Image (cartoon, rainbow, N blue to C red):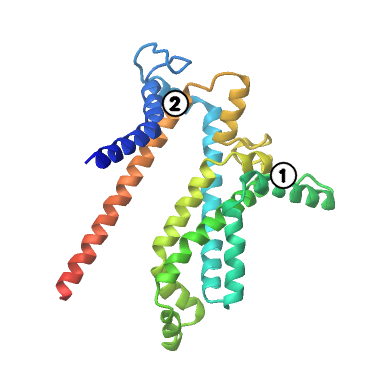
Amino acid sequence: MVKKIIGQCYIWLILILMYLPVLVLIAFSFTEATNVGKWSGFTFNLYPRLFQNTEIMIALGNTVLIAVISAVLATIIGTLGAVGAFYAKKRVRNTIDLATQIPVVNAEIVVAFSLTVMFVAIGNIVNAYIFSFWTLLIGHMCLSIPFVYISVKPKLQQMDPSLYEAALDLGCSPSQALGKVIVPEIVPGIFSGFLLAITLSLDDFIVTAFTRGNGLLSGEKKIETLSTLIQAKIKKGPIPVEMRALTTILFILVVIGVIGVSVYRNYQAKKIANRNRRAF
């Protein structure tokens, strides 16, 4: 009984530490006070002001564009890499597994610095400044691909390995067998890898700061994402109060997404359970 109470208290303590700062930020998105902790009256003014703040909107647009594009490309490359490694020889598969595990446990600063050194070296060879949207995109893809690989790999291991050979025996080409047999079996892993890739890109700062250049919605200026914009504002003074409204909107969207995925999974689980019940 005592252990159960201690366990529940510990869980509630962790939840409070995780969500209390977010709830405080949400509460202060309804006041125009510059500093969190000083209430200057209830208002919704921060929300319309958020969409009128060009600087934040450009940073948000850059962040979303980079996250979506890098996540899509990383998901494609990571999935193909996982499938290729799964059907490769044991020595090749072990080598690829080791190569994808190192970036996951490696410090992000090492990845960012090594990419920067590589881009500088290439720039010296071609005698040009190459830092741009493309270097930033490559950096985010390098960050995300190993996590996609790790997400897809378990689904391949759970799959019947003879399905691919059976599809080939029935007349499918290798590409048809991949698209019609393998991919449907590993869709949950692909989706999880895609969400991980988007999450990693959205909140990344170190790789972005080291590999960004000019482009995207920033035009001729250096690309600003939400993380780099907040860091720049902290150097000069308080963070724009409109960021509190943006944080609240993002948090609500995430909660809605999590609830939607949970409802969909429960629906699918009940559907499969009913189908199995009817089969018996």
Name the kind of residue labelled 1 in the image: Phe
Residue 85 on image: x %, y %:
55, 71
Dot 2 or dot 1: first in sequence order is 1
Vertical placement of residue 210 versus 144, above or below: above
Residue 90 on image: x %, y %:
57, 76
Mark 2, secondary structure of its residue? helix
- The residue located at (47%, 56%) in the rendering is 193
Label 2: few (<14), some (14–19) or many (≥20) C-alpha neighbours in 10 Å = many
Q: Is residue 265 left or right of 143 when viewed as pictured?
A: left
- The residue located at (81%, 46%) in the rendering is 128
Q: Quadrant of residue 84?
A: bottom right
Image quadrant in which the C terminus is located: bottom left
Q: Quadrant of residue 5?
A: top left
Please give the residue where the numbered disc 1 appears in the rendered image.
131
Evaluate whether residue 261 shows in this view. yes
Foreground label between 2 and 1: 2
Please give the residue where the numbered disc 2 appears in the rendered image.
244
Q: Quadrant of residue 186?
A: bottom left
Vertical placement of residue 176 versus 206, above or below: below
Image quadrant in which the N terminus is located: top left
